[in-house]
Image (cartoon, rainbow, N blue to C red):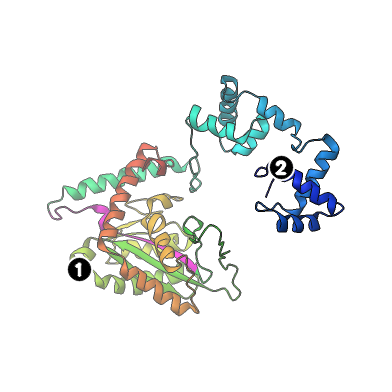
Amino acid sequence: MGDDRLTNQNKFDMMMVYGEFHQNSRRAAAAYAERFPPPHPRHQLFHELGDRLRARGTFAPNVRAEDRAARQRPRRDPVAIALVRQTLEASPHTSVRVIARLLGMTRTTVHDIMKKDLRWRPWKRWKCQELKPQDKPIRARACEELLDRIDEAENNPEFPGDIFINRVIWSDECTITNEGYFNSHNAHHWAPEDENPHCTVVTNIQGRWKVNVWAGVLHNKIVGPFFFDEAVNQYSYRRFLRNELPALLEDFPLHIRRVAWFMQDAAPGHTAHRVRRCLNHRRRWRGRWIGKFSPNQNWPVRSPDLTPCDFWLWGTLKDRLFPADGVRYENPEELKAAITRECRAISEDEIASVFTNMERRIGCCLIADGGHFEHLL
């Protein structure tokens, strides 16, 4: 404890005991605790009080020059407010501590100016995909074409109430490792404030392995998952399209399969000529696919914010596969079973809300002229 809870009489008694034990602070503190009621000061304070008396003849601590200057400086005056505003406008990511040091103010003063005078608050920054200058018009054009297809589907009497984006298999691949997924935003452990449990999260696991998973979102359920036991290239991907995907779609009614489109991103294995030929000429798709080099609907690169698997599915799966209490998977088969189980557990209502969100994203992307738009959602 400091000396703020001690009266001058307490300090006088401490110095008397300190002198009695020949300025041995530990013995003086022990004797003082036996003779006098609380508070019982730490032994270092006996030495500090003795030094103050010798140096300045007072129990009061020495106030540093910079602290005195800060106390004498006017608080939250127009000049101080203007200085804080200028500093924030020049560098909006600067911390309160840095601003206080730069301007010679206390952190409390800076914080009060920001909150009470400027009425500014800290906003979280969000991560986003880098966009090249040429990406924006391509993204905007793709969104316009999607909206046209949505309007066309709504006006088609053959499919009353149908939404075009529900007809599309929005697909993607993801690599999931046994190391898991650590979402620091949700990683809390509640405990009494005086009982820090010192929780940790194990990372950099030895014997690291991974699972390559493909999945899609169609109508009101998840297509798949399907697991690639090898690297995904044009050969393994074409085999998947020809042999595995039709079997996965057997779970869907015929009227949905008959009008379904297929969407893929621009990964190298997806854009190879043999893959495009498969999508263009096989009886099932006949060119009804969305992606790079598609004859009917191009899909912009670097656009995870528009793709349901990227902006929703993979993050949702990882949150459920690796909750904060630290689930561990012993082998790839165990992880594959968990992925399959979680995909099956996703409800129709959840997928419906994802498609509603996607429509909003398409509109917001157009408002942003193809640029970043998630701040508009």
At mark 2, the secondary structure is helix
Q: Is residue 154 left or right of residue 47?
A: left
Q: Nearer the viewer, residue 364 or 133?
A: 364
Residue 307 at what x, y percent from top left? 38, 54
The residue under label 1 is: 253
On whether residue 161 falls in the magenta region, the answer is: yes
Question: In the rendered structure, which amino acid carries the disc numbered 1?
Answer: Pro
Disc 1 to disc 2, C-alpha distance: 89 Å
Q: Is residue 22 visible?
A: yes
Of residues 369 and 220, the one nearer the viewer is 220
Reply above or below: 315 against 227: above
* Numbered label tally: 2
Q: Is residue 175 magenta?
A: yes
Q: What's the amino acid at mark 2?
A: Gln
As displayed, is residue 74 above or below residue 14? above
Return the residue at label 2.
Answer: 9
Point out the tag, 1 or 2, that comes first from the N-terminus.
Answer: 2
Residue 349 appears left or right of 52: left
Dot 2: few (<14), some (14–19), or many (≥20) neighbours within 10 Å?
A: few
**Proximity of marks 1 and 2: CB atoms separated by less than 8 Å:** no
Where residue 80 sits: x, y (%)? 60, 24
Whether residue 118 is visible here, answered yes or no, is: no
* Residue 285 occupies quadrant: bottom left
- Which segment did they paint magenta? 158-176
Q: Identify the residue at the far left of this view.
A: 157
Q: Relative to 196, does residue 74 appear above or below in the rendering?
A: above
Picture quarter with the C terminus? top left
Give the side of residue 361 with respect to residue 211, left or right: left
Q: Residue at x 59, y 72 (%)?
A: 205
